[in-house]
Amino acid sequence: MFNKVLIANRGEIAVRIIAACRDLGLRTVIAYSDADRDALPVRLADERVCIGPAAPRESYLDVPRILTAAEISGADAIHPGYGFLAESHALAEVCEACRVTFIGPPPESIRRMGDKALARRIMNEAGVPILPGTESGVSGVEEATRVAGEVGYPVLLKASFGGGGRGMRIVTSESELAPALNSAATEAQAAFGDAEVYVERYLPSVRHVEVQVFADAHGSTVHLGERDCSVQRRHQKLVEEAPGPGLTEATRTRLGEAAVKAAEAVGYRNAGTVEFLMDPDGNFFFSEMNVRIQVEHPVTEMVTGLDLVREQIRVAAGEPLSFSQGSVQVSGASIECRINAEDSERFIPSPGTITAFHSPGGPGVRVDTAAHAGAVIPPYYDSLVAKLIVHGEDRAHAVARMRRALAEMEVEGIHTTLPLHRRIMESEEFLAGGFDTGFIGRLG
């Protein structure tokens, strides 16, 4: 086991990692920017190292600064959390070269899954269902037009090295294709440093269902069930739940088997999430693999009773998984609401100082946050303030608990998405469980 873990992240996930390390008796070092000098993780960690100014590219996204922080603090492992460098094969490679353990998958697995077009090809060869389309980036408008004609409109243009909805365009006719391809490529170049775009069939009515997987270095790969993440706006998730509502046991079994097959196809280790798109008939198709711990991992923890961050650290240290596929049991239902510092009507950021903060409590309620009265939400980073998670004996019970918790939660001094989440929990469509990714647009 490690002696000291450097946390190359901020906010609630940094607090979460500190908790897991303390449970394992490990010392922690927080790498922080100037903007986070007074943040809760900086106060909670055993040691702290400032890695630069507020701008992410000069701090949280700077690989040399992260490695220097590990070296001067004597950390023998780095946990990247999610976002920032969590899916950077460059960081994983440098860690390997410097004999610092990267708490995540091998560099090659990150590289192969980071190339979305290559990932599609690998999944197709492994027998994991994929949507019709290209298995590499298109060379230009002529090839894109030919492929779109073969696949049939509407099609989706997607950045090969993208994520978060950037570098993505829906095309409904040939006349739209050329400008959409140019726009997607330009955005992909600006956001990810690579303009490559591929084409796949677009499903207008789809659910976003993902499967949590875990693999160790001893040949074990297991899945921990699925999560439904269909409540989203502009491809950004707002609400996640486990298990997915309305899925048959047969579908759950096939999802789990496909996710394990996907992880094994790239020699995966540690925690990962295989994301699928599901049509109204229950057919599902590989979308991408997130090679890190997910924001929504708590709902899986709530229904399985497993500590996924603790397991990440154990597996990275070379220990075998503490559970087998047969021992994984899903109990009850869990829902997570992402409380963001945003105007919930206009979805514009609302940075500032939190003047009052009240976390709900009671049975089956969990709040993952680094927020408190007096905490500053800076304008430089993701707007997540807190994750509100509940667990109930079934979905109806979980929804009731979420309603109560949302009513009790108070965040003053900034705008948040709390009003939106309260509306979601009252929506008949959400309560029925038959929603898809277009739900928020219909909510009004």
Image (cartoon, rainbow, N blue to C red):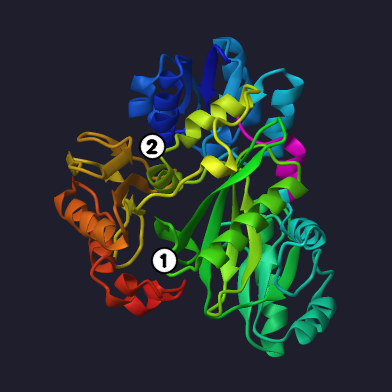
Q: Which residues are magenta?
A: 103-112
Give the number of callouts. 2
Q: What kind of residue is marked 1? A: Pro
Does the magenta stretch mainly form a helix, a strand or a loop? Answer: helix
Q: Nearer the viewer, mark 1 or mark 2?
A: 1
Q: What kind of residue is marked 2? A: Glu
Residue 413: x %, y % from top left:
19, 46
Q: Which residue is mark 2?
A: 12
* Residue displayed at 73% across by 42% down: 109
Residue 304 sits inside the magenta stretch: no
Residue 184: x %, y % from top left:
66, 68
Q: Is residue 56 left or right of residue 34?
A: right
Q: Residues within 10 Å of mark 1 (few under 14, many from 20)?
A: some
Residue 72: x %, y % from top left:
58, 11
Vertical comparison of 106 with 46: above or below: below
Q: Which mark is residue 245?
A: 1
